[in-house]
Image: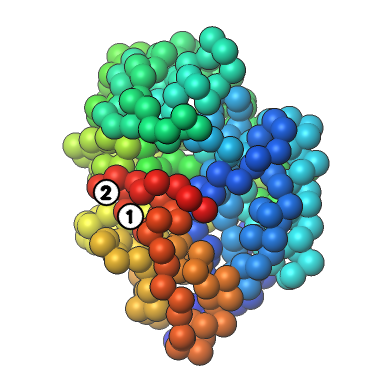
Amino acid sequence: MTTAFDPIVLGGMRLANRLVMAPMTRSRAFGVGAEPTESMAAYYAQRAGAGLIVTEGVQPSVVGQGYPDTPGLHSAGQVRAWRGVTDAVHREGGVIFAQLMHTGRIGHPSLLPEGVVPVAPSAVAAQGRVFTHEGPKEYVTPRELGGAEIGRTVADFADAARNAVEAGFDGVEIHGANGYLLHQFLADNTNLRTDGWGGGVEGRIRFAAEVVEAVAGAVGAHRVGLRISPGNRYNDIVEDRPAEVYTALLERITGLDLAYLHLMEGPDRELTSRLRTVWPGTFVLNPFTHPEVTGPEALGLVEDGSADMVAFGALFLANPDLPRRLAAGGPFNTPDPATFYGGDHRGYTDYPTLTA
């Protein structure tokens, strides 16, 4: 029987175990130009016992930033600063992928250069508020991306992936989940387009597929993972036909032979099983455990074949040596919900104030 503590080969790399540290926004890039800091290097190095670390969301362009003090991968300074993080993780024997996250309409002009506003597939504002340096602010109506701009945005993802490899990352994860830009193209209430990037299923999946194809072409498919969250309502998302849309997306990109698919599960385990069947490669599962955080019971998902790897979020914040504790059966420090948002499906209601 395969267990979560057995090694696995991912994109040609041998991982020590099948435990994934899920991406979680930390907002600690206090350096000039959204550059990573020494505290970030220490944070990730402490958790290098994971078979795979996926970083917090990293914006591939200036306009892709949606939260304060999040890091980028679109400048030479950011690449140099990330090298300090990847070197620290590698010294501890870890493997680390950068999550590329364009937040789309989730953001605020106060987080962007003067005159720049958030962009999206359609000019539809999200309901809710975003955290800024001045406190929570209402979302604004984003500017709809033109066709040429969509092509430039796809290229931004590819450029950021190249920068990630230059910075020493072992690969990248494309964030297609949680109501951010790729998810906005997939969803019914955020994509009102009638051109080739909207309308029916093929139009809705086009942007996500083009990003995946461009990134795989830039750095090699073996270095690329994709994260999705079918039916996740976080960030005011509505999806009427998630099974149809995500099956079509996976069928379009299966031939690329990506490193993995990372599913942030909703309450529909039947849909998880369906997509597990459709996806022929490595399947990473961040299981639905709302309102609790993902705990030791998730290890059984590898044992029963539901997933090849299992992702833990908040439990990794409270327990930097989580793989050792899981193997020993505990004890576990209890995560403080005030220190994180966007992980373990807390986003089905609202995110708590970021304090960590």
Measuring from the top left, give residue 91's x and y in whole percent: 79, 67
Measuring from the top left, give residue 270's x and y in whole percent: 22, 60
Measured Cα–Cα span from mark 1 to mark 2: 6 Å
Which residue in the rendered view is the most extreme toward the front? 134
Mark 2, residue position = 348
Whether residue 79 is visible to the viewer of this picture, yes or no, is yes
Instruction: Tell me the quarter of the picture where residue 285 sits.
Output: bottom left
Residue 49 against residue 29 in the figure, above or below: below
Mark 1, residue position = 345
Whether residue 18 is visible to the viewer of this picture, yes or no, is no
Instruction: Tell me the quarter of the picture where residue 170 sits.
Output: bottom right
Q: Are marks 1 and 2 in contact (CB under 8 Å)?
A: yes
Q: Amino acid at mark 1?
A: His
Q: Residues within 10 Å of mark 1 (few under 14, many from 20)?
A: many
Q: Disc 1 on helix, strand or loop? A: loop
Instruction: Tell me the quarter of the picture where residue 279 sits.
Output: bottom left
